[in-house]
Every structure is written in structure tokens, then in C-alpha cells.
Image: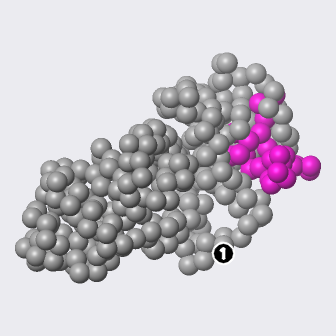
Amino acid sequence: MSIDYLVTHSGGFHADELLSSAILTRLFPDAELRRTRDRQWLTPAPDKIIYDVGGAYDSEAQIFDHHQRPSPLREDGQPYSSFGLIWAQYGRDYLAALSVPAQDIDAVHTKFDSKFVLPIDLLDNGAIEPSVAGPLSGLTLPALLGSLKPVFDDTSPTADDDAFVAALPIVSTFIEAQIRNMTAKARAQSIVLDAIAAAGSSAILELPMGMPYAAALDQAGADHILFVVCPRGEEWTIGGIKLSKDTFEQRADLPAAWAGLTNEALEDASGVKGAKFCHNARFIAVADSRDAIMQMAAIAVEMA
């Protein structure tokens, strides 16, 4: 497909067409990005992708607006913004362009859609209020992107376009970081599942390095595992496992007698030579060797 023009509306910008532009400019780097409401530019053509403007949604004609009635809806009835429409059409190609492994593309596409795209769609359509973020409402991605707009008394005739162009690489960085992390979690999944199998009935999960493990624990139903150990540079760590991402509560805490201790004091309290540090909140401890951390892990399991 030869795309020469990426066309969206002029004037003030919102998160949905800005994020859409990040996807499209990555896929079509030689295309001209044109912000306009000129009807001639909003007429579909084979060399254009038109989005967040134009009054129609027709993926074959490469026009992706959501402001018309009836507006495009997801299968579950939730509304699309232009970002959701662009992601549905071009997201898999975007992931391939970022070298996401082919076997992970569908899973990452779905996860990014639900975790990143859908909230933008809902907010842009007024299906949720910014206030749902509570005291962090001013720090959501749409709010931060909105802060990149020109100030009210900037009288430059190109102020909106200049701000849009300046915001684009910032947006691209956020998207690519999310994709990079989601892809890394997909890589970690198989490593952690193998480690869970190797652990058997043990309450201690040993990993070859620090990595995301919660999803694999859930997938494997490994509720018996209480602590995770892994190397960190020349040291080794033991950490508790949070009950969920929304809490600091853990399946089990490290022993209360270790809290806040370091070096000789921790060695004395634990009886383990090489124990170096235990956080006061008892969610992580450090030792100077695998042997020492495994001793600490055995004690922590027994105390739990």
C-alpha cells in the first residue's frame, strides 16, 4: 500500500488523533501529515488515510472517524475513538514494525487495546469522566497530552500545528515503552512457567533474573509459592508476592525480627552468614550469595 498523506483535523488536538498519528507515522514514515478541515483533503483516496475527521468510518476507503451518527462501536457496545479504529486496523502491522515476535502479536495487540486504547476511547467519547482517576485525574495521559497544547494567548498562526508536531515524539515514546514492556512480559511468561514446574511443591520460586512473574503464577495456579528469589548483580534477593497489583499486602511477609536490619545485625537476627539487608516493610531482603538467600528463604517459609 502506498500512502502519501495522513490526514486529520486542524485546530486543537486531543489524545485520540495524536496517538493515532504516532501509529501511522511509524508505519508510513514518508507520508505527509496534514492537519486540515478542507473538504478536498477529507475526500477518501487510495493514497490517503483520514482519521478523526470526515464524518465516516469505512476501513476499505481508509477513513476512520467516530463523530458521526451512528458512531462505530466495539463488539461489546463500547464506543471507538479514532485511536481505537486505527489500532484495530493497523495495530498488528505496527507491532510487526516494532519487531514483536509473530507468535506474540495477537496477545500483545489485545492487551494493549484493553489496557491502553480502550480508556482513551471511553474518555474521548465521554463514556467515562476524568474524575474516575480521583486525585490523579490531572496526571492521566490525556491530561498530560492536553498540557502540551499552546497557551491561550499564543497568537502564532501555526501554534496548534507546532504543538502537535512537538507532542508526537513524546506520544510515540509512551506507546513504544508500553509495547516493549508487554512484549517483555510475554517473553518472561514461558521462563516463569518453567521455573514454577521446576519448583514443584516448594514455596520458593527461583528465577534466573528479575522479571515479571505474577501473570504466570496466576496462569499456573501456583498459590503455594510464597517467595521469589533471584540474582541481582553480585547479590541475591528474596521478595514477597503481592496479593494483587492493587495492594501492598503479600501472601507472606519476611520475618518480623529482620525488619530494617542490615549486615551483622541481620546476620545475628537471621542466623545466616551473608545476610545484608531487609526492608523495614518486610517485602524484600538481600544476601551476598545464592546459598545465603536460600537459607533465608527456608527460614521465611518456616516462619510464615
Q: Residue at x 65, y 42 (%)?
A: 110
Q: Farthest residue in the right direction?
A: 70
Q: Residue at x 66, y 33 (%)?
A: 90
Q: Farthest residue in the top direction?
A: 1
Please tell me which residue lies in front, 31 or 198.
Answer: 198
| Disc 1: CA contacts within 10 A as few (<14), some (14-19) or many (>=20) | few
In magenta, the rendered stretch is: 61-86
Q: Would you say residue 266 sits in the magenta stretch?
A: no
Q: Residue 73's spot in the image, x, y percent?
A: 83, 48
Q: Residue 30's spot in the image, x, y percent?
A: 55, 25
Q: Residue at x 81, y 28 (%)?
A: 61
- Note whether 214 is above or below 100 in the view shown: below
Q: Farthest residue in the left direction?
A: 264
The amino acid pointed to by label 1 is Ser
- Note whether 197 is above or below 286 in the view shown: above
Q: Residue 4's spot in the image, x, y percent?
A: 64, 24
Judging by the rendered image, the residue that carries numbered circle 1 is 131
Q: Residue 27's spot in the image, x, y percent?
A: 57, 29
Is residue 166 at least partly visible in the picture? no
Is residue 144 at least partly visible in the picture? yes
Of the 4 image quadrants, the one containing the N terminus is: top right
Numbered circles on residues, count: 1
- Note whether 49 is above or below 256 in the view shown: above
Q: In the rendered image, which quarter is residue 78 located in?
A: bottom right
Of the 4 image quadrants, the one containing the C terminus is: bottom left
Magenta-highlighted stretch: main secondary structure? loop
Q: In the rendered image, which quarter is residue 120 located in?
A: bottom right
